Amino acid sequence: MKTRNIVALVLSAACAAVANGEITAPTAMPIQRTLNALEKSTAANPARVRMLFYGQSIVEQGWHTNIVRQLKERYPTAILEVENRAIGGFTSPDLIRTAESDLYPYYPDILFFHVYGSTEKYEAIIRKVRETTTAEIVLWTSHLEKKEAESRESIEQLLAEPDGRSKAIKDIAARYGCLFVDLRKKWCKMMLETGNTCDVLLRDVIHMRPDGPAFGYYSNFIAEELVRIPETNGEPKFSGTITEIPVTDSRVKSAADGSLRLEFEGNRVVAVSDGSGVGESSVLLDSKPPREYSDMYFTTRPSKMLSWMPMIKHVEIAPGAMPVVEDWTLTYIDGTMPLGDPIHYKVEGSVTGFDGEGWNTNDFKSVSGRAVISKSDFHSWQYRYFIKEGNGDKTRDSVPGQKITWSTRALFTDPLPAGKLDARTTLVQNCANGRHVLSISPQAGGKVGVKSFIVYTPAKKK
């Protein structure tokens, strides 16, 4: 009864918001799969939702915790796995590189995304989210920076005629089936109605004051649009499908030795434990161990050195190279100049060993092909900005011995360990989005202990 009352209150508040013109999305249909799962959550069978907030400094500021808090209050039994991986100063041309480590491998159930910079790169990020994951997506327009809100007249003008960037984001949201929130419109109305000035809302030309009302406005303007539409379950033509298949389903074949064989279509499978597993079980995808598929590995975001930004945006794995799970170190060596101009380095893997030398002025491919670094991804400009121009500690000039680290990680599990009841384990991820056969076989005297499989199937290209 308590859950019904909460839902009724939320729906009532949503109806009032629509009537008052506070809701700017034409529909919240693009996020109904997530909200449906949250609504059905119970203490005995809690919903598990993976949330990612991604963008640059505005997203990084921390207001997202208000949205998470409100969702936890509305759905108290749900288990929310929340990450904020935003990077200050990274516009879309930068973020499109770090997304290879931060976003697609994380495979969120719902993505909250906002970034400045090229709308072409912005769209490319959203396109790849659609191609490689089943995430539902929330997009929104920007609040006003100081120069845009110099007078009441300028705010009224922006309210009357949306800017080009806002129109572009709205178009992207429509093309890719995302929830679109016109936060900019709401921000203009708020400033006109409350009389709040940029001195009250902002701590500089664009960033919000953490000690003022801005965080509350910003988060609430998004949260109020996360409205449940009864009897709906999202838009699979855009976000694809997430299907739980019990081991009793006809798509799962059981053998006398306790092995399981699942025929599925998608690019990710998660096993849900029944708690009865004994020992380890081997995993095969299309008759091969997952470790033999190079696409089922990824590299983590490289470490920072001079600031909060990674020193290298992304380290790739060369086509045809066979990765292994390992840790990597890039070490500056003789020939490196002060202020990183240029940087001479060597690359070593904890399994691969020494794998070549390079310069930040050239593209680099390691001997094994397990580490590929584009010269455009090397952030040596940080030396000039944070040290040479007086914005940092001059004792941190680039010198031999400095290190940048990252790791190669697996997007699969093999072997599958015995798990506690309801434990979830990703068996395979980022295989080709198509038809596959997954086999799990227990060791002698063992037991698989899986009660269901969750299959993720991104929408196919039109």
Image (tube, helix red, strand yellow):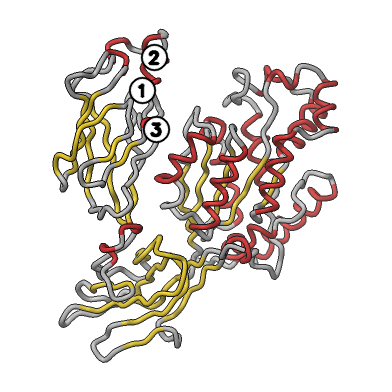
Q: Is residue 361 above or below residue 456?
A: above
Q: Amino acid at mark 2?
A: Arg
Residue carrying label 3: 377
Q: Is residue 459 above or below residue 282?
A: above
Q: Which quarter of the figure is the N terminus placed in?
A: bottom right
Name which quarter of the figure residue 102 lies in: top left
Q: Is residue 113 left or right of residue 375?
A: right
Determine the residue positioned at 32% across, 29% down. Answer: 362
Q: Which quarter of the figure is the C terminus placed in?
A: bottom right
Q: Is residue 102 left or right of residue 399?
A: right
Numbered tag placed on residue 384 in the rendering? 2
Secondary structure under badge 3? helix
Secondary structure under badge 1? loop
How crowded is the residue under tag 2: few (<14 C-alpha within 10 Å), some, or many (20+)? some
Expressed as whole percent of the image width and height from the top left, the position of residue 137 reads 59, 52
Expressed as whole percent of the image width and height from the top left, the position of residue 411 reads 34, 58
The disc, 3 or 2, on the residue closer to the chain's N-terminal end is 3
Real-space CA distance between mark 3 and mark 2, rounded to the nearest whole angstrom: 16 Å
Contact check, label 1 and label 2, Cβ < 8 Å? yes
Q: Is residue 368 above or below residue 163?
A: below
How crowded is the residue under tag 3: few (<14 C-alpha within 10 Å), some, or many (20+)? some
Real-space CA distance between mark 3 and mark 1, rounded to the nearest whole angstrom: 9 Å
Numbered tag placed on residue 380 in the rendering? 1
Determine the residue positioned at 57% across, 31% down. Answer: 58
Q: Is residue 323 left or right of residue 45?
A: left
- In the rendered image, the residue lying farthest to the bottom is 256
Expressed as whole percent of the image width and height from the top left, the position of residue 100 reads 42, 46
